[in-house]
Structure formats: C-alpha cells, structure tokens
Amino acid sequence: MTIKRCMWLRRKPLGEFDDADLGDLIMQRISWPILVPMALGMLAVNPWLDCRVVTAALLCDTAGVEDKYWQAHPDQAAELEGIVEKVILAGASGSVCQDV
C-alpha cells in the first residue's frame, strides 16, 4: 500500500470502508481500536472476504494483529477465534492464510 493511499483512506468516511480498505489500514497498524471491530463485524457475516488476490485476506490481516492488542481486547479475540473456528469447520484450514 502506498503512503498516498494510506493518507487518502484516513480521510475517507468509515461508513464507506470496504474490506480492502480495512485490510490495508490494519496491515499498516493504523487505528486498530476502531478498525478491528469493524473488520470482525464484516468477517462475522462473511469470513471469506478476499479484498486482494488472496481468499480470506481480511481474515488474515485481522489475525495478524499483534498479541498485545488481543490481550487488551479479549472480547474481540474471542470473536476472532469463533470466526476462525467457523472457517476451519467449513473445511478451509489448508486454503486460508498461514496465521489463522
């Protein structure tokens, strides 16, 4: 992601964000307390969101958030675990990102 895109996204209204926007900023470690809950909401509906070429890219980006964040937000960590379990139960454990 370019710096220009990052700066543009910081001015974009949150209500207009899509999964690619969320994934890009989450990967850049920007505004996790705001963006991670939004990502979890999208993932609860569809964990297969593929904001880039990778299937379930938003799930991978969100799962890649540092442990320190999850320790400070155990309710969100539990929500992510539930989403990951749903994906695994659907038989996708080998086709999604390595971090999940």
Image (spheres, rainbow, N blue to C red):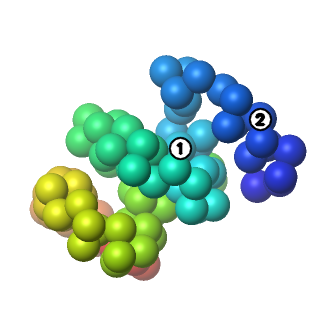
Q: Which residue is mark 2?
A: 8
In the rendered image, the residue lying farthest to the front is 72
The residue positioned 24% from the left and 61% from the top of the image is: 73
Q: Position of residue 47 (x, y in %)?
A: 32, 47
- Residue under the point 63% across and 61% down: 28
Q: Secondary structure at mark 1?
A: helix
Give the spatial CA distance, label 2 vs label 1. 13 Å
Look at the image and tell me in which quarter the C terminus lies. bottom left
Q: Position of residue 97 (x, y in %)?
A: 44, 70
Instruction: From this view, report whether residue 90 is shown above or below residue 34.
Output: below
On residue 22, which mark appears?
1
Residue at 67% from the left image edge and 37% from the top image edge = 10
- Is 10 drawn above or below residue 15 in the view shown? below
Q: Is residue 12 visible?
A: yes
Assess disc 1: are there few (<14), some (14-19) or many (≥20) residues with their C-alpha within 10 Å of its C-alpha.
many
Type of the residue with mark 2: Trp
Mark 1: which amino acid? Answer: Leu
Label of residue 95 in the image: none
